[in-house]
Amino acid sequence: MKRWLRGMGPGLLVTAAFIGPGTVFTASGAGAMHGPALLWAVLFSICAAMVLQEMAARLGVVARQGLGESIRASLPHPVASIFAVVLVVSAISIGNAAFQYGNVTGAVTGVMGALGDQPEWNLQPWITAAVGVIAFALLATGSVRTIQIALSGLVAVMSVVFIVTALLTPTDWNAVADGFIPRVPEGSLMSVLALIGTTVVPYNLFLHASAANERWQTGDVKDSLSEARSGTFLAIGIGGLITISIMFVAAGTFELGTEVTGGELAQRMFANLGAGGRWLFALGLFSAGLTSAVTAPLAAAYAAAGIIGFSKQRKPWAFRAVWFLVLAIGTTFAIVLDANPVVGTIFAQSANGVLLPLVAIFLLWVVNRRKIMGEFVNGPMSNLLGFAVIGVATVLGCRHLVLAYGKAVEYIQDL
């Protein structure tokens, strides 16, 4: 058990990153619309995340480098290197700024929901700024241990809040058991892909590899790798339990077939859960938003540092400049915009859709190179699972692009 706990630090960063407002709203929307029928999709997404994140952690432990460094070192041709730099910096750094808007506003939605009826003056800009300041304060410490401890506490809060809320929500356990049998009810394909897409995200691969490298810079590689794997599986498993709990709450709160999304979903959850449930759900949503608001800028900085080649220690100005810009842009948009950031969402979905299959393919290629991984290269089963995940990631990427195109058309038509 000690080995599992020792290795949880980098894994908890991943959990803190993917259990954000996007996951809360996606799982809630799937539960409200389809009940527990898509629990199998959550289980698959968690397994897929474990497969890819284990490879990323193994790269960091064995090769002693992050994913960005591996991309730069393995693409010596100038044209390929420039393409990789532009792709990663734009999709991860700029795209994360767009996602950061959702992270910050998710945390703010939690606070506003807990407050209930609002006073005459508008508190939202002040709460938004406060969330940005809290995230800045954690990142500015420059201590990965401090960040991990803070995020571990927030993940623990999320776990308790959503699990307790789920236990307090009436549940049809027969339907829950049926939900783990893979099937795609009519009209549920987009929800299936969304559940996978909100869990398996490309920037987490950069974040995990770099965090694992920093955590296990010394010591026996086999022992370090065992700790990293155990911690990864445990931390991502906790994230899966949180997602399942959120789906339970929505399935037990809404009538089957209810179609609600985004802020409307949050408001209805607050209204339907009652005073105590509203506070619990609001606390969980705030924690989800804040954890992602910290990890998204950090992941962008790790990715940019690795692919460009500047120092990835958290004190140098270049590393700080990246995470500060991502945090500042996302927070500023959250303060200024009253409506959904359509353009930012379009870009973020497009970036994620393009980057996820490419990064997954590259990661699989790297961990199969004996020159880099030595005896710790992928085995046949890991490769089989990896190719399966890449196939899903490709479908998911196409789906993101299609949705982004549709939203772009709607946005242009509304102008």
Image (tube, rainbow, N blue to C red):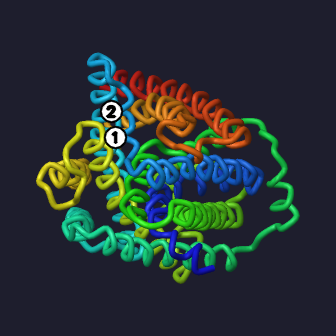
| Percent x, y of residue 272 | 59, 70
Q: Tell me: 102 left or right of 196.
A: left
Residue that lies at the very extreme toward the bottom in this rendered image: 276
Residue 176, quarter of the rendered image: bottom right
Number of labelled discs? 2
**Amino acid marked by disc 1:** Glu
State yes or no: discs 2 and 1 in contact (Cβ < 8 Å): yes
Residue 20, visible in the rendered structure: yes
Residue 235, visible in the rendered structure: no
CA separation, marks 2 and 1? 5 Å
Q: Is residue 36 depicted above or below 347 in this figure? A: below
| Percent x, y of residue 228 | 53, 63
Q: Secondary structure at mark 2?
A: helix
Q: Residue at x 71, y 66 (%)?
A: 252
Q: Residue at x 48, y 29 (%)?
A: 358
| Percent x, y of residue 63 | 44, 48
Q: Is residue 253 depicted above or below 396 in this figure? A: below
Crowdedness of circle 1 by 10 Å Cα count: few (<14), some, many (20+)? Answer: many
| Percent x, y of residue 232 | 56, 61
Q: Residue at x 39, y 38 (%)?
A: 70
**Amino acid marked by disc 2:** Arg
Viewer-nearest residue: 6 or 159: 6
Q: Tell me: 16 left or right of 2.
A: left
Residue that badge 1 annotates: 69
Crowdedness of circle 2 by 10 Å Cα count: few (<14), some, many (20+)? Answer: some
User: Where the N terminus falls, by quadrant?
Assistant: bottom right
Viewer-nearest residue: 349 or 75: 75
Q: Secondary structure at mark 1?
A: helix
Residue that badge 2 annotates: 72
User: Where the C terminus falls, by quadrant?
Assistant: top left
